[in-house]
Amino acid sequence: MSGHSKFANIKHKKERNDAAKGKIFTVIGREIAVAVKEGGPDPANNSKLRDVIAKAKANNMPNDTIDRGIKKAAGDANSVNYEVLTYEGYGPNGVAIIVDTLTDNKNRTAANVRSAFTKGGGNVGTPGSVSYMFDKKGQIIIDKEEWDRDGDELMMLALDAGAEDFAEEEDSFEVYTDPDDFSAVREALEKEGIPMMEAEITMIPQTWTQLTDEDAVKKMNKILDLLDEDDDVQAVYHNWDE
């Protein structure tokens, strides 16, 4: 596993998104709705819902907001059905981009995603065109400022819980798991009282692409900003080495 940390990028995104919590809560609210519809409203019997709740708490979503989202999804048979759609494509200089969406209108979402790519000088590709360049992994990030014990102790706790890999970076500790083991590892660390900055299934690039041209950097940021502003977009993965 590459030791290349994206913690600085994650902190930047969180700081930027803290000014627009409505976007974060919309994203997580949709994930709660999908998790409840797929596995029921009881987190004890729904590991996907437990994972979404953990993500919600990591993003400082109030407990009553979480509870309302679960009750609404469980009690409203006519609530919106969201469809999971993934888009793959290229940004400037061949940067690989994957966009995960949850939408109630796939025509709107497709148009918006294509527009974001086009305005940033990129293009949407066919399914599978870039996903082979990423590994799907569970990723748990612990801020060093929040962990007051030894890093080796954290590593042993993670590996004993079933993690595949552990990396110590300048600002963080990063735990990687097989997607199927993510819930069990996350819950084991949660029981140990370990504070998690991020905890979710993600796509880890196998290689990184640098952008040295200022115009290319501006275009790439344009794509990411437009996607970030779209409520249908749940997550964006890329291999730009910022």
Image: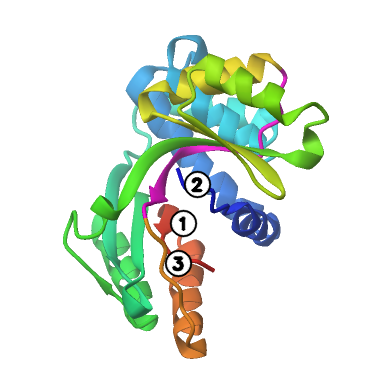
Q: Which residue is mark 1?
A: 231
Q: Which residues are magenta?
A: 193-206
Residue 51: x percent and y percent?
Answer: 51, 27
Q: What colour scheme does the image use?
A: rainbow
Q: From the viewer's perspective, is residue 150 above or below residue 206? A: above
N-terminal of the pair, mark 1 or mark 2, is: 2
Task: Look at label 2 and name its amino acid.
Answer: Val
* Circle 1 residues within 10 Å: few <14, some 14–19, many ≥20: some
Q: Amino acid at mark 1?
A: Asp
**Of the pair 38 and 48, the residue shown nearer to us:** 48
| Residue 133 at x, y percent in the picture | 29, 54
Residue at the front extreme of this rendering: 152
Q: Residue at x 38, y 35 (%)?
A: 79
Q: From the image, which quarter does the C terminus lie in?
A: bottom right
Question: Are discs 1 and 2 less than 8 Å apart at CB?
Answer: yes
Image position of 144 with respect to 124: above or below: above
Mark 1 residue element: loop
What residue appears at the point 79 percent right and 36 percent down from the top-left corner?
Answer: 146
Whether residue 157 sits left or right of residue 121 in the image: it is right
Q: Secondary structure at mark 3?
A: loop
In this figure, which residue is indicated by the disc labeled 3?
240
Task: State which quadrant residue 31 falls in.
Answer: top left
Q: Is residue 38 magenta?
A: no
Q: Which residue is mark 2?
A: 27
